Amino acid sequence: MARLVLIVTALGLLVLLAGIGVTLKWQRQMQQPLNITAESTRYHLKSGTPVRLLARDLADKEIIASAWAFEWSARRRQLTGKLQAGEYEISKALTGEQLLQRFVLGEIYLNSFTIVEGWTYIRLLEELKQAPGISQHLAEDLSGQALMSALGFPGIHPEGRFLPETYRYPTGTAAVQFLKRAAQALADELAHIWAQRDEDLPINSADEALILASIIERETAVVEERTQIAGVLIRRLKTGMRLQVDPTVIYGLGDKFDGNLTRRHLTTDTAYNTYTRAGLPPTPIALASRAAIKASVHPEAGDTFYYVSRGDGTHQFSVTYEQHLNAVKKYQLVKRP
């Protein structure tokens, strides 16, 4: 009987030692770098995937060395119900343990897409079709009115209503979801900037500030000139002078504009022709940056009423029309050999 007890005890000890050995082996495997050849790769963890199937799939794809080690680690730490679905970026610098932790924390890969100031909303919709990770694209025949209703902004024209900046988002984000975020960002930013506006402005609402900002955005790409341009346009509005800016005319022409703005275009009346109509156009003409919106409500003080392009991206500002004509002759009517 004593001998039997001794044998059982010895066998139990051997099993315990074997278990310890396996445990140590799995621990070492979980501390090893992932088995991928590229610097990084993507892995999509589907919702509801059991840890056993996840471990097997990672092993089959040769991302981890041992499915048993991965599953054991997850179960030992009671993490099996905490793995979050999504697309993950996996680098070969990660260990199996770090990968498991990434799944638990939900550190999913985020795509990025930049909305560029000066784009029209039509250009934005076209570019968004090529954005990485965007799904459920908009219907081709979706009207601007229907689009804004879907975004929660019914009755608002879509032009200028999306904030230019770089957005990060998970793979599978719907186009409507992305645009709703950009539209809300613009609404929030516009309200904030409008609340801090200068006094005695000839604009009566945040919407009018956005319209003016879109013109400023299209008139200059030079950051330092935005408040100067704003100052000129504000003074014209105050005195009842027509804005007379080419980008509004071009916007009003739409598909009819072939890249060559003529005198006939300037005299052809549309709702956006600021040569034939006083005041602001009915809607923005482009997506305006934060800087342009701020410039629209914080114009630079001065007495200039005119500006003309120097041909290098900057502008020459003038106080009188005579000075302006001289600047036009100098920078726009230069005879070339």
Image (spheres, rainbow, N blue to C red):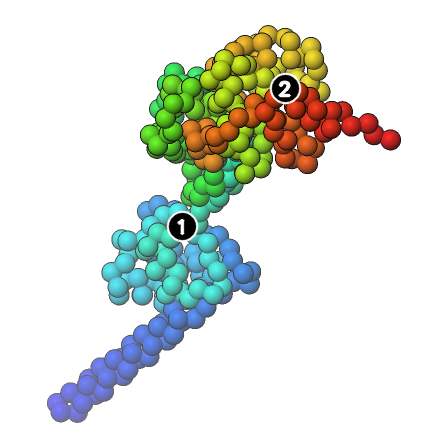
Query: Dot 1 lies on which element?
Result: loop
User: How many marks can you see?
Assistant: 2
* Pointer 2 or 1: first along the chain: 1
User: Local crowd at mark 2 within 10 Å, few (<14), some, or many (≥20)?
Assistant: few
Judge whether 258 appears above or below 227 on screen: above
Foreground of the two, 230 or 192: 230
Q: Is residue 155 left or right of residue 144?
A: left
Residue at the location (63% across, 35% down)? 314
Whether residue 258 is situated above or below residue 7 in the rendered picture: above
Give the Cα separation between the discs numbered 2 and 1: 59 Å
Residue at the bottom extreme? 3
What is the x, y in percent for residue 207?
Answer: 41, 21
Reading the image, the residue beneath label 2 is 321
Query: Which residue is at 35% across, 32% downward?
Result: 196
Residue 140 against residue 75 in the figure, above or below: above
**Residue 258 in picture, x, y percent from top left:** 69, 19
Give the structural element (helix, strand or loop) at label 2. Answer: helix
**Image position of 262 with respect to 42: above or below:** above
Image side of residue 219 versus residue 13, left or right: right
Residue drawn 36% across and 48% down? 85
Q: Position of residue 192 (x, y in %)?
A: 35, 33
Q: Quadrant of the C terminus?
A: top right
* Amino acid marked by disc 1: Ile
Kindly give the residue lying farthest to the left in the view shown: 1
**Residue type pointed to by label 2:** Tyr
**In the figure, residue 146 lies in which quadrant?**
top left
Residue where numbered disc 1 is placed? 108
